[in-house]
Image: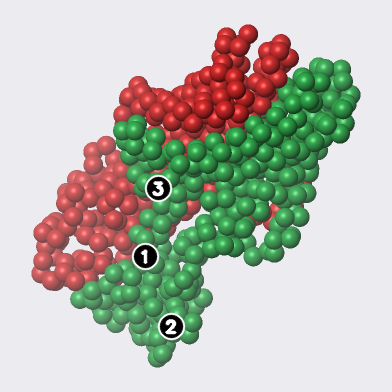
Chain colours: A red, B green
């Protein structure tokens, strides 16, 4: 919104307060101090203005390093700024630093709520984003099914690819049926690791400025550590339960490699989307999951083929 | 916060405005109109107060049905009220309707942001909830692994149960290796359906007052419709690719039943948690996923055993 109270640094608190009466403003969280060219110099919260001595110039009382954003700023970063600076409305300035208006608290609240529901729905692959979560729970089943089927159909295609992958290793399965026992477990674990990375990446990518290589290196190391931890538990369990050293090595190695791959995919997919100008949250959800599943299957069966046959 | 501007309905706008100067308030989004007993009667947004004629009594200009909450209200419902009524701060009243204070915009913004990150982390099974998503991406890998392992260990236990389930059907797999081809696909699809239900339930349960039976009935019908839609595509595909009628029926039926079971679990788990006073978001995430996976495996292999052997 554009109509906000403005004042000069030399204006006195009492006069500014009196001048507010009769003004038709869109947001009155603060009075914004600007110079002759309209450049933002600071802000005085209205709450503070009420207690200032009437003779005090605003310039002496203002917050001289106010948060501010450009008109094209990411909505989420605006909200983070508001939280960090403890203001309810964030000023918007142009390239020259001239005050254009503010993002009011009301809008920030709506943005945060909408982003929240959107992220959840994208993670789950629900098409229509509805601000009223209640609607999604109380709408007629036929409409709900229609909203949810599209992503599932993409998932179905992925499932077919997964089926194809497993069927390519038919001989391995025929020779060694125990290999099949671990398929759901390995796919699940790699998925769980990947989902963690996605959840962090979806929010973190819009805030972090670190280069991808560093982020990727960190995630990969995290994934390997997690994989090593899980593998250390899986190896003796499988060895004990099945008494087969090569099977135990295959399964433990499968979790390790698939887990590391999952963290990579979990970071790369949201990153690619955010580079392409899309919301990284699209890179989570059901499509990312099936990509990871197929990858995990390939990793596991390749290891099994090499070690067991 | 408790210190907010109050006024009587008969007070005139000009006098109220003049009276604000010198008052030390925590939030000045609006002036709250109360009666002699301190009961909330309405509110006048400060923005509107500035443009009111000085002689106008507040009672004529106030929003006489202001949103209000009790001190023990769910944080999220407060935010939804603020959005619906387009106010930035929500008044808090006691049982007698007496104004206690307000939840200011600043607090609402922080609440929404925190709930957002928390939900994402719970969905992904990350232990430590950190308001700074950036931290989670830039922290040392060892600490990150430590934050993420606990839920994965629970998941590992679940994976072992999944392995056990599949190994119980060893004979089926030996007799009919093609049964194994569809395991990842069916588990994935049932999971995707269940995750959708969870994402809706996590947000919806705190807002909806419909009884569980109705919600469950609706979700079950939705799940069956989705399952029927997917089954209608799966049946001919499997029949065409493998030329085996009984296998095609088993797989399609497996998706149908597992999908319906997934919607039930996806709704029941968050509901049970919310009844137990816990955040329903805990009912999503990696533990819910492995429960669904095990259930899907049981459903699929039982159907296969009955139809194929």
Name the residue rendered at 69%, 61% in the picture: B212
Locate residue A151, reporting x and y percent.
Answer: 65, 34
Q: Residues within 10 Å of mark 2 (few under 14, many from 20)?
A: some
Nearer-the-camera pick, A217 or A154 = A217
Name the residue rendered at 62%, 61% in the picture: B208
Q: Which residue is mark 3?
A: B129
Locate residue B61, reporting x and y percent.
Answer: 44, 77
Locate residue A116, reporting x and y percent.
Answer: 49, 48
Name the residue rendered at 16%, 69% in the picture: A52
Residue at mark 2: chain: B
Q: Which residue is mark 1?
A: B104
Disc 3 versus disc 1: distance between alpha carbons? 23 Å
Q: Which residue is mark 2?
A: B98
Q: Secondary structure at mark 2?
A: loop
CB under 8 Å between discs 3 and 1: no
Residue at mark 3: chain: B
Q: Is residue A118 above or below residue B170?
A: below
Q: Residues within 10 Å of mark 1 (few under 14, many from 20)?
A: many
Q: Is residue B239 above or below residue B192?
A: above
Task: Work out which quarter of the rendered image holds the C terminus of chain A and state it.
Answer: top right
Disc 1 versus disc 2: distance between alpha carbons? 18 Å
């Amino acid at each position: 919104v554009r109509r906000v109270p403005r004042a000069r640094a030399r204006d006195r608190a009492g006069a500014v307060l009196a001048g507010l009466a009769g003004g038709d403003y869109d947001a009155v969280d603060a009075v914004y101090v600007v110079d002759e060219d309209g450049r933002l110099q600071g802000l005085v919260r209205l709450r503070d203005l009420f207690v200032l001595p009437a003779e005090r110039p605003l310039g002496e009382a203002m917050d001289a390093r106010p948060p501010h954003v450009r008109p094209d700023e990411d909505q989420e970063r605006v909200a983070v700024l508001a939280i960090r600076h403890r203001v309810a409305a964030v000023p918007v300035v142009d390239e020259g630093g001239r005050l254009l208006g503010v993002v009011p608290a009301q809008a920030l609240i709506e943005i945060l709520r909408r982003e929240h529901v959107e992220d959840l729905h994208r993670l789950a692959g629900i098409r229509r984003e509805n601000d009223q979560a209640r609607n999604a729970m109380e709408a007629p089943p036929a409409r709900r099914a229609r909203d949810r089927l599209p992503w599932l159909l993409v998932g179905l295609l992925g499932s077919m690819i997964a089926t194809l992958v497993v069927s390519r290793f038919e001989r391995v399965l025929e020779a060694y049926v125990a290999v099949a026992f671990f398929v759901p477990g390995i796919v699940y674990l790699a998925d769980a690791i990947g989902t963690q990375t996605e959840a962090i990446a979806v929010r973190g990518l819009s805030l972090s400025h670190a280069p991808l290589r560093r982020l990727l290196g960190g995630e990969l190391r995290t994934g390997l550590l997690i994989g090593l931890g899980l593998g250390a538990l899986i190896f003796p369990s499988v060895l004990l339960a099945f008494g087969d050293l090569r099977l135990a090595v295959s399964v433990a190695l499968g979790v390790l490699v698939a887990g590391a791959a999952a963290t990579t995919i979990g970071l790369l997919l949201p990153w690619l989307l955010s580079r392409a100008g899309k919301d990284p949250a699209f890179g989570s959800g059901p499509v990312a999951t099936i990509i990871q599943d197929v990858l995990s299957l390939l990793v596991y069966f390749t290891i099994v083929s090499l070690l067991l046959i």
